[in-house]
Image: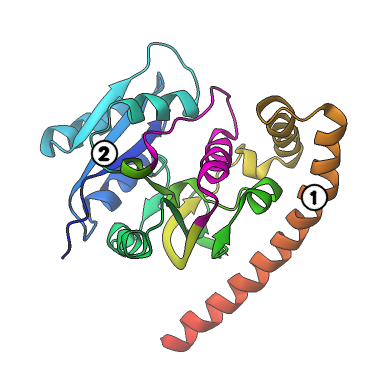
Amino acid sequence: MTDYGLVSIITPSFNCAEFIGETIESIIAQTYQNWELLITDDCSTDNSREVIEKYAVRDPRIKLLRLEKNSGAGIARNKSISETQGRFIAFCDSDDRWMPEKLERQLEFMVNGGHSLTYTSYDTCDESGKIVGYVECLRRLTRATILRDNGIGCLTAIYDAEKIGKRYMPSIRKRQDWCLWISIISDIGEARGLQEPLALYRVRSGSISSNKVEMLRYNFNVYHEVLGYNKLVSAMILGGYFMPYYFYKKLKQKRDYRRRCKALAERQ
């Protein structure tokens, strides 16, 4: 297997004891083994740290970092990024999982294509782990298309720090990952997607993806507070650009999921 260099995997952790073992196991199971996993705990009140420490004792590639006060996933990710040693920076949240060939397939796609930021399609599951959906990524994202919708699942993203340097997320509570992709794409021109489902995103109750009103508020804040558009322009982008595509995307995801289930059934 080709060694493309060290991959630094970024995982924020907050009260994730129920799921983080599965996350870590999916990374340990990667066919590509040149990686380090940097988990920053955001002041968990459950036994998340104890679970992580058991893995860290057994595998020196796993490192547990801690924040002094609860600061949100973006700050936790930035803490991990600041400690990375790898050429590639990858992301996997503490309740998500990777397919075993995720790193191998995506790094091959990334290096052979000369891409600085890549992402993949992914399946979604409920809190019990049952597959409930499928998100097929676009093959290419520009600044115009990433402003319309966060087309990069954070659990699938990898960027090449050797090419573009270490890049950090803004210090906001929500949508930090989207802001990072916008920033990178604004600089490099485009990101490329590998349309293979190489990760599994867990949809949890109370998340931003399950609260549509909160989603709209946070998206407005990205346009207004992070990107600097005035309130009128931000509202116009949200209502006239984001929302129509959002409804189209939801219909497309249902169609793609039915198609994927049919294809999988035919293989059995």
- Give the structural element (helix, strand or loop) at label 1: helix
The reply to whether the magenta stretch includes residue 180 is: yes
**In the rendered image, which residue does mark 1 sit on?**
241
Q: Nearer the viewer, residue 266 or 221?
A: 221
Q: Residues within 10 Å of mark 2 (few under 14, many from 20)?
A: many
Going by the numbered disc 2, the residue's amino acid type is: Leu
Query: Measuring 60% from the left and 35% from the top, which residue is drawn there?
Result: 175
Q: Nearer the viewer, residue 29 or 90?
A: 90
In this view of the protein, which residue sits in the foreground, 211 or 227?
227
Give me the residue at 27% from left, 43% from top.
87
**Are dots 1 and 2 in contact, CB under 8 Å?**
no
Task: Point out the stretch of residues depicted in magenta.
Answer: 164-191
158 above or below 264?
above
Task: Specify whether residue 188 is painted magenta.
Answer: yes
241 horizontally vs 55: left or right: right
Q: Residues within 10 Å of mark 1 (few under 14, many from 20)?
A: some
Residue 36, image x, y percentages: 22, 40
Percent position (x, y) of residue 134? Answer: 55, 64
Q: Is residue 239 left or right of residue 117?
A: right
Instruction: Residue at the far top: name it.
Output: 68
Numbered circle sitting on residue 37: 2
For residue 129, say whether it is visible.
no
* Amino acid type at mark 1: Tyr
